[in-house]
Image: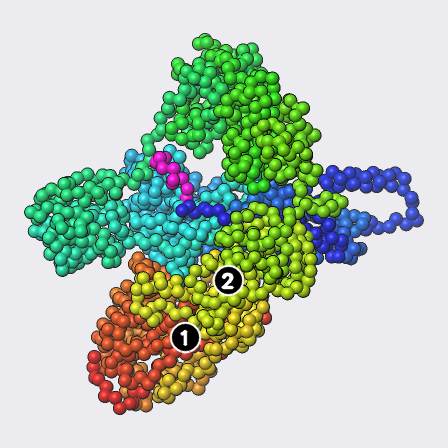
Amino acid sequence: MSLFSRINAPWSFHQTSQPYGNGHGPIVDWTHQWRSPIESLLERFDNLIDSLRDRLSPEIPEQRPEMPSAPVITVDTKRTEGLMLEEHQASIRGVTGDPTDPALTRGIAFSFTDEDTPREQLSVTIESSDPEVARAALDDHDVLCIAPVNAGNATIMVTVSDGKRDSQYTIDYAAADGSQTNNNARFHTGASDTSAAIAIGNGLTLVGDDEDQTLRLYDHDQSGAPLKSFNLDEALGLEEGEEVDIESVVDAGNGQHYWLGSLQDSERSMVFATQITGNDAASLEVEVAGQFSGLDAAIERWAEQNRPEMDFDGFEVEGSAYADGTLFLGLRAPIDADGRALVLPVLNAESLMASGSADGAQFGAALTLDLDGRTVRDIAPAGDGTWLISAGPANPGDDDGDPDNDNFQLYRWDGAHKVEEVDLNTNANATGGTAETLSNARIHDDGSVTLDVAYDNGTTDWSDTGTASKDLDDDIQTFTSATVTFDALPSLEPAVGDVAFTALDSNTNTFSFVALDAIATGTTLTFTSGDSAVTWTAPQSGLAAGSVVDFTANAGSFTGELALSLADGVTITANGETLYRAGLEGGENDLTLPGDDESLHYAGSTSDTAEALLKALSDASAWQTGGEAAGDFTIDTGHAPLPPPEPQDLGIAISEIWSGQSGSDVTEDWFEITNTSDTVIDFNQTPLYYDDDSADPEEAVQVQGLTTLAPGATAIVMVDGDEDAVAGFREAWSSVDLNGQEIGYTGSAAGLGSGGDQVTLWLGEPDRDTLAAEESYPDTEAFDAASWDVAHQRFITLENGGTASDALGGDGENVPAVATPGRLSGNNEGATSECSLLITEYVEGSGYNKAIELTNRGGSDLSLEGFTLSLYANGNTEANATQALGQYGTLAVGQSLVLANSQADQTVLDQSDDTSRVINYNGNDALVLTDGAGEIQDIVGTIGDDAYFARDVTLRRDESVTEGSDRFDAGQWQAYPQDTVDGLGSDATGDADTPADDVPNDTPPDIPDDNGDTMDLPPVELISTLQGSTMSSERVGDEVSVEAIVTLDARDGLEGFFLQEEDADQDNDELTSEGIFVYLPDSTSVADVAVGDRVRLTGTVEEYQGKTELTDVRSLEVTAQDQKLPTLTEVDLPIADKSTLAALESMRVSFQGEDGAPLTVTDTYELGRYGTVTLSSGGRLSQYTEINAPDQAGYQQWLDQIESRSILLDDASNAQNPAEILFGRGSEPLSADNTLRGGDTLEAATGVLDFAHQQWRLQSDQGLDFQPANPRPEQPDAQTLEDAPLKVASFNVLNYFETLDQSGNQITTPEGTEHGPRGANSELELIRQQDKLASAILDSDADIAGLMEVANDGYGAESSIAGLVEALNARSEAQWDYITPRDDSGNVVSPGSDAIAVGLIYQRDSVTPEGNAAINTSGAFVTGNRAPMLQTFQDNDSGETFSIAVNHFKSKGSVINGEEAIGDGQGNNNPTRVEAAEQLAAWIGTDPTGSGDSDVLIIGDLNSYAMEDPITTLQGEGYTLLDNDYSYSYNGQWGSLDHALASASMSDQVTGTTTWHINADEPTVLDYNTEYKSPEQIEALYNDAPFRASDHDPIIIGIDTGSDVQQAAGF
């Protein structure tokens, strides 16, 4: 799937009637709101005349009064965000469909003041020069909001007057059409060619552009101008005009980033480093920290030695990555000879940066990546040690013949040779842009990934003006960004067909195999024969496709012993999956070999596609006895660049080329073509395309003005010219007989250079098969102004038959051109006769019902050869689409030709002769009929004018009209009702012989006239007829009227309201819904509504993201108030098939549990963010593996079951972080004191059933009566603990960092690694976090507490664990201390290199540490799993000793080692956690602390539910699981990731275990964080009680070491 998909956004700007400006009168209608610029000018001219008259004949007063001061307009920058505004004017970009358009959603805050006049007496007017482009209005707070309507440019004039003097503020407004992007796309101004980006802080992006050296900081989630900019020209020592051509950026560590140019030449060869500090717009600073140049020359030297056969003259780097000191350069060009993209490692980038020169650049072996014929455009870290690559089409000239790889695609890369395509499932289209920039990849707990993508929109014509974005002023240059989401990173593990044997020798127990696809770093393959096996591990450099691995030559990469027997078969497996098997007959083999040979090798082809080679390798006939196996294979990607295309014999030859002259040119450049075939070439049927020596099909331009070319005839083509150039040519060569000579032109195109160039032509859409001719010519210096004779390969002179032009040019305006234009004069075959072809019917109906009728109203048959019908849409002056008519042959007298839209109703298509892309217009688009000479023969509408002349209407030409016209005359046409098509094709009126009086030609029917006449509205229908019995309405696009009851007014939250038929009007069909949503983002132009109102409205049926709704409401009337609401429909959960809820969509419903039981709160994770709660039937939802053994089939059934048991309750608002969180207990809002906990209940959930964001949800704007079925436990359950003398607690403290997460802060681990903080990002948050944790630990009454997720910042006085202990001691009489792990020499032992670690704290009056704590950082605890800590304690009362092992296993989130979830419920990385459990048990068994005591408690966050493999592994090692309750909630499912296990000798000393439910049950919004909270919420949603101190519940274990139990000594 491409990175681009189109999802229509539900956006429209409605005509409104709204109050205006501090009590001034309302704007009655948009049609009266805009003053004509001419009227304004005339009014000001009259005022000027009056002023002059007063000055010429003044009345002399006794004392001249002071001139009153003019009003002052000031932009309030504190209230205006996202826009770049100057003192008196501004240039602003707006985008239709953009939900964050700053000028529309936030507006421009003005201040209007006058020394003599109070604000309320000032008059403010707002004028738009083109209301069809932009409309604007001022609100009561003097905030101007501008709404884009259509693409184009307009001027918004703000005028303030005190009655005597005026002041103005001018806004040059550029509108773009973003309606085809979804709401996820954002439009950022200030730059166009984004090429590199890094994430900054929370939601910010620092962007580089390949057009300058300015880094710009943007809010990724908001459209608009940069928040801050950093121009680095001076710091980089660049002169004006010099550029780096920034293409990529990498994080080089230590706060430094390397920014790379394209490196394609010496001027763009710079790599520079920046030091970035700060994480928000206020604090962010960027300083240049170093630079070096010359890498381009170093790469060229490398290419000469390593890729001599490849053309590196135009190489270009666009993506880069940085890992372990190596800078990886991803090349956009060239692509490798085998069709793989090149990545070139620079091994010493850091030393190059230090030296300031690339002279000593050292390169590693080039990596070649199979990106399906694409090359690298950007590379970004995926967040798990692998990378994401944006890959785009290879450069022109690298065509591989595959039309399916001409788009952008995303890949996962292992950093070596292995890539896999990413399966995208949620995307955003960026208008006209390419996905050049990746940043900020985030892997979520469920394995899904989100990625920020910025698009290069440098060539986008945003406003349909013909100007590319990069050529606009900076203020309105625009690029787009979006966040794309995909379900999971693709696996990099080998699949079936990726490997096969190349040799097998049972005598020596050896073999070799080939990788038919690249194998990722660290991949493990197991080779099994009988009961024996060996394991091979891929090297750090991975394994390239085609590599052969020989057992003997690579013995160091194999472990184990193999007794190879073909009788037993030999199998290759990876992660338990069989990839390949060889054996003798009778087995299920991929390769079946004869039984009498013991040593065999493959002797077949070693160069082909992977599929073909796999087939050959599996064919026993290709195997031979003895000998040696083949060397490495060559894997054909199928995407190797094809050889340069050769011109085809298509009947076109280039016969002459004139490329201009020094000084002024006589004419534009031109060339001559000759028809070398024996048939007429019709350029209307097969267009001619031109380019210069770049020969780029994508840049080729269509030649205009040519009609046909007879055999042997010639035609002239003007290069980079238009009709004027044609006329100039004829004048310049007026003495040459050019009568009948075809002369065409290219329009804007690449000119022909005097230093030698080439003419390249295609006959038909440019590609390899349509290349018609290529001819080059040499430098013209010695033959200035002479044309090139292609046939004789010489310049034409007067001596060899040339002719001098009549016009003179050159440096002295005295040099003629010398050529032979038209020497092979052609005839005039194919010219049209005198025209009698007219447009006689114009159908602009509903939906796609559009058709054009053309009729021969002359007196003889008419050939359509040379005629063209063209569409000029939206006021364009160039055709948007053309249709050559010659293919339709000849029209007899009175005969008609009908062309229709291909998606028109069958009624229209049945009466049409053909379909055409030209027939795609609205009532303001011109259709033009031209003849073979390009002259206009007839027209409907006006070119360049987008005013409506006919919409929702059929126009028929008066029969008396027999000649066409180049100007549209509405008086020649009669209008008929919409969708009138009878008689179409017969040049007659059909049955509809009475024109429709109610369908005017000049006014859209849905706009009331100035007299307020009643609108023509469709009749009222039942909602059930619109909804239908299927998931989607069959009435989409229809304008309809309904009358029903307002059941939920959600205009503030959902921009609309819900309607439902009265009980009496319901159709009693269980398959059809009686309700519908009305989308009304701006309700100021229609009547106000309230719940209980019966309203009659007219709107258009639409489907938006699976929900049927009414949009574009143009009439709304309240017909009754305070009506009885429709009866609630009762729904019992579970619901096996939720698609059946479509029959209740938008209706009032009441959900209950099974058999009427209450519903249970099972998820409040997004209660504070989106106001939602998940409710379930049959109690809260459990995690599958909390109560079931892992199983793939069982897990899927479980997911289906819990889906059927749940429903989402929503607060009828799309707003994030609502000011009032609706759902707390007892129908009251949520607060710190009025929580809503998991397990609380609700008798019935009532509201309106909605389908939004791909999920069924119950909308309610009222609090519901939740009951406190799960009270807050103030203390752990003492009864369960049985008054234990000692208590041990396991606390996950949720990233407790005393270094604040702000201003680029870093922590340094004892091992020396640096990490960004993960916890509090302000002093206030740290205090709040610390208070809650201290309350929790102290109230737990624990004597020892194991901690997870504490900052790994050492054990000094300033460390986080020391700070937490200090906070405990300040709040308690007990004296807490913490464990510092040391070795026998007293040196601190590092707990690993991760940002977080485990820790132990204890009360000194309860226990005493015995010896040093032990840390294990080997094996499974190097990465992923945090290093466990083991400490032996002595009970101060009993004197007995016991040990505590604190653990934190790898999470189920980001994948490591390719250990993706296998669908059995255990999530990602289960093997890593199992390995940790095994190693932990073995390590404890060695008595690391030397205690000699087998009493051990294992505690911590094991990231495994109770029935999962890591837990059963520990149980299998003799440990008893002590906990049996949930401690964590994820996706509304409950289980325990936190555990306590006791050794056999310890378990009898455990008095009891309890999980203290203070965290997991509580809404996340009640935690310590202050982000996204108002000052009132910061106070109301927080207290220092222990509740929501973390996201995991603590586990408390009671211990009595002085019991009479006989304790075992030693392990």
**At 44% across and 64% down in the image, what residue appears?**
1135
**At 39% across and 76% down in the image, what residue appears?**
1594
Q: Is residue 562 visible?
A: no
Mark identifier at residue 1593: 1
Total numbered circles: 2
Q: What is the basis of the colouring in this image?
A: rainbow
Residue 1353: where, in percent of width, then height?
Answer: 38, 69
Mark identifier at residue 392: none
Is 1539 rendered above or below residue 817? below
- Pick the residue in front: 2 or 384: 2
Q: Residues within 10 Å of mark 1 (few under 14, many from 20)?
A: many
Query: Where are the magenta residues, as a range?
Result: 399-408
Q: Which residue is mark 2?
A: 1257
Element at label 2 = strand
Q: Residues within 10 Å of mark 2 (few under 14, many from 20)?
A: many
**At 21% across and 75% down in the image, what residue appears?**
1486
- Pick the residue in front: 1036 or 6: 1036
Q: CA distance from mark 2 to mark 1?
A: 29 Å
Residue 455: where, in percent of width, then height?
Answer: 47, 46
**At 28% across and 87% down in the image, what residue appears?**
1440
- In the rendered structure, does residue 402 fall within the stretch colored magenta? yes
Amino acid residing under circle 2:
Arg
Q: Is residue 981 left or right of residue 323?
A: right
Q: Is residue 718 left or right of residue 1426?
A: right
